[in-house]
Image (tube, rainbow, N blue to C red):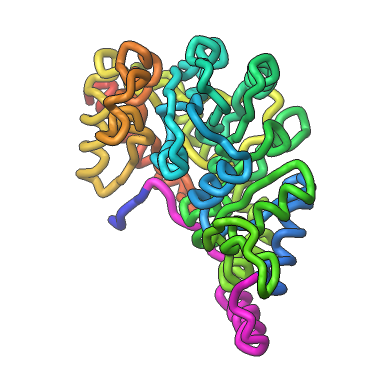
Amino acid sequence: MENIYVTSPSLPPLEEYQEYLASIWQSKKLTNYGPFHEKLEAELSQKLGVEHLMLTSNGTLALVIALQEMRITGEVITTPFSFAATTHALHWNGIKPVFSDIDPQTYNLDPAKIEAAITPRTTAILPVHVYGTPCDMEAIGKIADTYGLKVLYDAAHAFGVEKDGQSILNFGDMSVLSFHATKAYNTVEGGAIVCKDAKTKQRLRYLQNFGIADELTIVAPGINAKMNEFQAAFGLLQLKYVDGEIDKREKVWNLYDSLLDGVPGITRPARVPRVRANYSYYPVLVDGEAFGTDRDGLYQRLKEDKIFARRYFYPLISEFPTYRGLPSADRANLPNAHRVADRVLCLPIFADLSPEAVQLIVGIIREIALGQ
């Protein structure tokens, strides 16, 4: 049997990409805001229902320069339950992360815990739409308004996600996307920043291109975070197929849901009302006592059968050596985050995952649970 990984990237037809490559070869325009780049920015803005979007070479640099443009300093309240890049972007900007606990149902930053973490040095909140599930954006917005804080959403998982028919990327001061190969929509590597107005986008462009305003003028200590033409062309093709790929992911999700129904000790992901999802992840929580083995036991058992699930996100960022000395990293401050991180396992989900593969995975899970 071939290996089954937690995800597998969707790729456009090779012959279509070769046509785009021929165009790049003819123009010799490889980067620096070429025609494919500009077209992708425009088409993504329309697709995602946002007005001002700037492409970047990856999602991490998008976070780094968004924080720079927002002039965030001091302390930022964020979640320990995310990919490392969320907090690393703060570190690279000389900002102190302050970890706050998560909601045990959504796994997102819990608004009820945020106020207790605010100090005179707090300047912003950096929540994550974990697994593409929208944060409680209304509650977070009210807290930010009350205390004069900025809000930058890490929307790395949230391509195309809508709530009540509106893109969740329009909330907060900015939102940052990732188009990494593991995402529902990818440009191989890549990302984007969604902001509120054209002036902010222009300042972001300065920061992503060394601060260059013109041939003789450097207006800011910028970095190189531009998306090249090869990525942009790839992304344009991906846009043609992404809706169909997400539909396929939903079918995989639904099959997992039906097959895992009633399995003791397995908590399935909840569907969020009034949300259009992208089905990027299928996280389950494993209750070792009720299930028959703990999360790591299930992880190893699947691995023996060449099924590579992932413990997203374990360990918590607050457990990393760089951050575990922070007062907010204390385990007692983050009980829900630890509980989820110790139990979570993301099962394989991608557009081309076959029903037979899902049945195999769930068959192993049911075998353990039912002691067969």
The C terminus: image quadrant = top left
Q: Is residue 8 magenta?
A: yes
Could one spot residue 368 in this view of the protein?
yes
In this view, which residue lies farthest toward the bottom?
A: 26
Q: Nearer the viewer, residue 259 or 275?
A: 275
Picture layout, residue 287 above or below residue 63: above
Q: Specify the quadrant of the image occupied by residue 49.
A: top right
Residue 232 picture location, percent across and down: 62, 67
What residue is drawn where x is 24% and y is 23%? Answer: 294
Side (left or right) of 347 relative to 168: left
Q: Is residue 189 above or below residue 322?
A: below
Q: Which residues are magenta?
A: 6-32
Q: Which residue is at a point 62% across and 45% down the rendered structure image?
A: 69
Q: Position of residue 18 (x, y in %)?
A: 59, 80
Quadrant in the picture for residue 331: top left
Image point 30% across, 46% down: which residue? 307
Left or right placement of residue 221 versus residue 200 in this view: left
**Residue 10 visible in image:** no
* Residue lying at 50% horizontally and 59% vertically, measured from the top left: 189
Nearer the observer, 230 or 248: 230
Count all numbered tags in the image, as a single digit.
0
Can you give x and y, in whole percent of width and height, for residue 199 in the image?
77, 50
Residue 329 drawn in magenta: no
Which quadrant does the N terminus fall into? bottom left
Q: Quadrant of residue 142?
A: top right
Image: 241 above or below 109:
below
Would residue 246 appear left or right of 305 to someone viewing this image?
A: right
Whether 306 is drawn above or below 36: the answer is: above
Image coordinates of residue 180 in percent, x first then y, are 50, 54
